[in-house]
């Protein structure tokens, strides 16, 4: 019996100094490009945009708190005005590189601590939504299903619902903190099982064994996760075996 065909976008956070972009590109359909605040620089942005163009991978801006010391993964004591100015400059760097290389900016996805705050704190969700709506109204945002930013953005900008292949989840749908043990899923077979359940059953298995129903359009494998290249290669094989086509969300 022929399997029903499903579709999913596989994205990676790139340009963060790992140097594995060329190896990852053939196996993903979109990427989130560091904008120079938590990692990266203009030279890296230009190089990764060129790689993405070659492999027909959607390019997204991946802005964060301007905090290279902590890789954007801790909440930074910065005013909303300062943060807004920084986010504008960050997104513009990727947008300019895309324009220069005749590549369409595909999406915007906040990084690290800012991503987590936008998922639960209305003030940060509104800041990011307001900024995208004003400057890039046709560009969608990657965000968790039923998150604060997905609700704030509804009817204003397009939301592409995201889940994580290599992260464990709490029962409330939030990610297990990186400060805790087992926040990251590193066993390749566990990542595959996690992803297949998301795509085929529209459910996320939590660390405690419960299941959360969720709409999922794109699934992230962090570029700095151990064995990230091996993980995305195996994902491609297993998704194909289960009649799941990897493609960019239009």
Image (cartoon, rainbow, N blue to C red):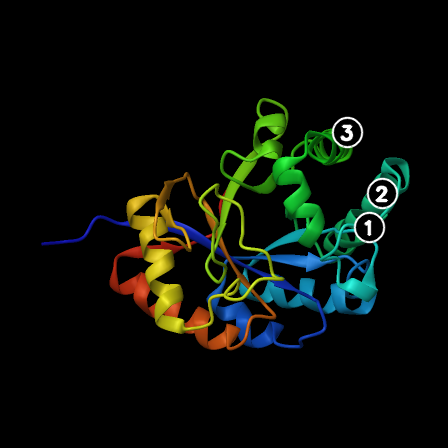
**Residue sitting at x 63%, y 24%:** 156
- Front-most of residues 58 and 34: 34
Above or below, 52 against 102 in this view is below
Question: Which quadrant, please, contains the N terminus?
Answer: bottom left
4 over 128 or under it: above or below = below
- Between 170 and 94, the residue placed more toward the observer is 170
- In this rendering, the answer to whether 215 lies above or below 3 is above
Residue that badge 3 annotates: 134
**Which of label 1 and label 3 is nearer to you?**
1
Distance from Cα at disc 1 to Cα at disc 3: 24 Å
Identify the residue at image location x=57%, y=32%: 150
Mark 1 = which residue?
Answer: 76
Q: Residues within 10 Å of mark 1 (few under 14, many from 20)?
A: some
Tag 2's secondary structure? helix
Q: Are marks 1 and 2 in contact (CB under 8 Å)?
A: yes
**Dot 1: element:** loop
Identify the mark at residue 125; answer none if there is no mark.
Answer: none
Residue under the point 36% across and 50% down = 198
Cα separation, mark 2 vs mark 3, equals 16 Å
Across and down, in percent, residue 83 comes to 85, 43
Say whether disc 1 or disc 2 marks the residue closer to the N-terminus: 1
Inspect this view and state whether residue 108 appears: no
Q: Earlier in the sequence, mark 1 or mark 3?
A: 1
Residue density around tag 3, few if under 14, some if 14–19, many if 20 or more, within 10 Å: few
Q: Position of residue 166 (x, y in %)?
A: 48, 63
Q: Earlier in the sequence, mark 2 or mark 3?
A: 2
Q: Residue farthest to the left?
A: 1
- Which residue bears the numbered disc 2? 83
Image position, residue 126 (x, y; %): 72, 29
Horizontal side of residue 5 vs 97, given as left or right: left
Towards the viewer: 82 or 116: 116
Q: Are marks 1 and 3 in contact (CB under 8 Å)?
A: no
């Amino acid at each position: 019996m022929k399997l029903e065909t499903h579709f999913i976008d596989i994205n990676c956070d790139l340009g963060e100094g790992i140097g594995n972009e060329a190896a990852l590109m053939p196996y993903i359909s979109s990427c989130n490009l560091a904008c120079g605040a938590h990692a990266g620089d203009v030279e890296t942005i230009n190089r990764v945009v060129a790689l993405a163009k070659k492999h027909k991978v959607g390019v997204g801006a991946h802005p964060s708190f301007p905090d290279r010391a902590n890789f954007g993964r801790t909440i930074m004591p910065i005013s909303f005005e300062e943060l807004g100015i920084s986010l504008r400059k960050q997104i513009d760097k990727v947008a300019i590189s895309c324009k220069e290389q005749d590549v369409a900016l595909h999406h915007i996805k906040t990084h690290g601590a800012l991503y987590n705050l936008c998922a639960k704190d209305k003030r940060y969700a509104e800041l990011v939504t307001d900024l995208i709506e004003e400057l890039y109204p046709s560009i969608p945002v990657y965000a968790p299903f039923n998150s604060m930013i997905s609700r704030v953005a509804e009817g204003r900008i397009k939301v592409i619902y995201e889940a994580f292949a290599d992260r464990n989840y709490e029962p409330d749908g939030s990610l297990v903190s990186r400060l805790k043990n087992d926040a990251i899923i590193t066993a390749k077979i566990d990542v595959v099982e996690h992803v297949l359940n998301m795509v085929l059953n529209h459910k996320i298995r939590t660390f405690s064994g419960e299941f959360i129903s969720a709409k999922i359009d794109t699934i992230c494998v962090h570029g700095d996760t151990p064995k990230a290249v091996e993980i995305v290669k195996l994902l491609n094989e297993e998704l194909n075996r289960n009649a799941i086509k990897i493609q960019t969300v239009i």
